[in-house]
Amino acid sequence: MKYLSTPIYYPNDRPHIGTAYTTLVADAVARYWRLVGEEVYSVTGVDEYGLKIARAAQDHGMTPQEWVDDIVVRFHETWDLLDMSFDDFIRTTEERHRNTVQPLLQRMYDAGDVYKSHYEGPYCVACEAYYTPEQLVDGLCPVHRRAVEIHAEDNWFFRLSAYGDRLLRHIAAHPEFITPETRRNEVIGFIQQGLDDISMSRSSLTWGIPLPWDPSQVAYVWFDALINYVSAAGFSDDPDRFARQWPIWAHLVGKDILRFHAVYWPAMLMSAGLALPRQVAVHGFLLVGGEKMSKSNATQILPSDLVPTFGSDGYRYHFLRDVSFGPDNNFSWEGMVERYNADLANDLGNLANRVLNIAVTYRQGRVPAVSDPGAPEETALRAAAAEALAALDGFAEFRTKQALDGVWRLFGAANGFVEATAPWKLNKDPDLAGRLDQVLNAALESLRVGAVLISPVMPRAASRLWEMLGLPGGPGDGPLAATGVFGTFPAVTVTKGDPLFPRIEVP
Ligand code: MSP
């Protein structure tokens, strides 16, 4: 079972291309695993409690519940716009979540890991995070570069300090636990400096989940939010599913929330007696003009700004092909147009157009199912298809760019194949009709394999291409080990339709 999660997002505004990035990678990887034939459970959702949301609601003259009910609609709209295929969408105000948070916190309390103390220190509401004065940069939040507040309360504390050695042992024994390695080293360094206990409740806030042993306090929002991963796995409402689904295969997170997922969260799970995630996979930020794109600066770009021009497929392709999972990546409109025109309009769009056109013109769309004669041209094409299929496994490690590089080498090879075999010349000589059938069959087969391989990334284009190829079922039906192998194109009737990716003209 491949259970994978995105962070649950703060519904203080609609999602932008930065938040959509994590969600998109998770979706493409989920689709990849489904294509392979694995059972998948992919979850996204919203993080609805906490001070930040309570304040956003107040600023808009609404109750927190009214506010989150309103904003959550924008999340669904955005994910629909981008063809996200989640198995579950969790809201932390749901009962299944409360019914999971309370027993888990109680387990931590019963384990002797919770005690009452006084907290006083800087707090960044945008991060919903406590800082030490040393962690601030020029007195400001190191992530948001915004003023912090000083919070002073009697709170319940979690004995994080007791878990440093166990965490280090776990990380050493499971090299795949935090990826990429730079983030793993960062976490090791952080733990080695010594962990402080952390406040895990709030007494001045009511918008949260009450602690079972002290209902006058609510859980600190991260202590409820992280537990969403256990709630969504069915802990309180579907124990059988939970038994199959936990521990999670991978948490996808941005680098700013690494500490929460790779230090606090595993310590909480150890305390509550649950198994640790297989992996926390960490990506960098999307930058616009060199700055982190965020809700609070003027660089915010929404998916709905891009989809009308590029389509959901063009959007998905760009972020999965041009953004490497790991480092920071700069976003540019020009780069996106260039990539679309070169790879989608030209490489794939023209290939499909050309091959389908020839098949319809020379063979009325019906090419016989002649098998590969083993000519050098076909052999090269078959080898490129095998490499593309192998490259797709990059998705298992979030290497979306490398996977797509491999698929595009197949389209390059297929375009080269058409050039080298020149069907328009073969068509002129009736003695070469048999060779023309072979060439057309191989060219169509490369489109079929291509449709399968792009289906996790561009589900719409893959389905349209599949339809034009006249094939039964869909390109995502799998299993990949069978459908992704270059063989003989069946004797079906292909048609030509509108271009898959109309060129974007730059004014
Ligand atoms: N609610 C918490 C997560 C709780 S998970 C138990 C939260 N929410 S968030 O909405 O602020 O951010 C969620 C994710 O969006 C983070 O992984 C963050 O890294 C990502 N991004 C926000 N802006 C981003 C970019 N500009 N670029 C890439 N990802 C960024 O944190």
Image (cartoon, helix red, strand yellow):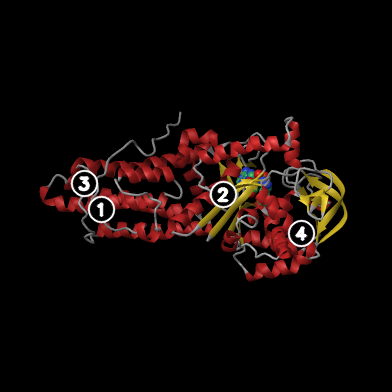
Res. 106 mark: 4
Res. 158 mark: none
What is the secondary structure assignment of the residue under circle 3?
A: loop
Q: Are marks 2 and 3 in contact (CB under 8 Å)?
A: no
Total marks placed: 4
Residue indicated by mark 3: 366
Q: Is residue 457 visible?
A: yes
Q: Are marks 2 and 4 in contact (CB under 8 Å)?
A: no
Q: Is residue 296 visible?
A: no
Label 4 to label 1, Cα distance in Å? 60 Å
Label 2 to label 4, Cα distance in Å? 26 Å
Type of amino acid under label 4: Gln
Image quarter of residue 167: bottom right
At which x and y percent is residue 121? 85, 49
Q: Nearer the viewer, mark 2 or mark 3?
A: 2
Q: Are marks 3 and 1 in contact (CB under 8 Å)?
A: no
189 displayed left or right of 335: right
